Amino acid sequence: MDRFLENEDLSEDFNKRGIVKKPQMKKINLDLPADLVQQIDHIAQKIGIARQPLIKIWIHERLKTEGSR
């Protein structure tokens, strides 16, 4: 960040890393029992994140586990 604030040319750094693209997102609907949603919300609040990011983390972790079997 200091190099940026000092107006140095950072173009070489960007060329080395290439362009980073965000993954294509697809929206899904998920019906869950109310008590399960309450449990998820309780855990999310306890660790200080919203419900959706918590669910994404859990799904990602499970997919990594299943993929390594």
Image (cartoon, rainbow, N blue to C red):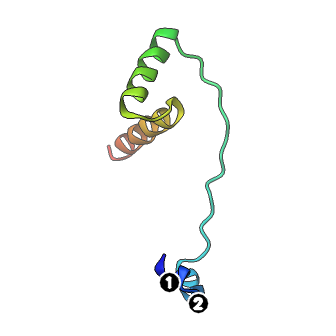
Q: Amino acid at mark 2?
A: Asp
Which residue is labeled 2 in the image?
9
Residue 20 higher or lower than 39, as above or below: below
Q: Amino acid at mark 1?
A: Arg
Q: Residue at point 58% right, 86% down? A: 7
Q: Give residue 15's position: percent from left, percent from top.
A: 58, 84
First-in-chain label (1 vs 2): 1
Q: Residue at point 65% right, 46% down? A: 25
Q: Give residue 21's position: percent from left, percent from top.
A: 63, 63
Q: Give residue 14's position: percent from left, percent from top.
A: 57, 80
Q: Give residue 35's position: percent from left, percent from top.
A: 46, 9
Q: Residue at point 37% right, 33% down? A: 47
SS under mark 1: helix
Categorize mark 1 by other alpha carbons within 10 Å: few (<14), some (14-19), many (20+): few
Q: Looking at the rendering, which quadrant does residue 28 occupy?
A: top right
Q: Which mark is residue 3?
A: 1
Is 40 left, or right, of 7 in this rendering?
A: left
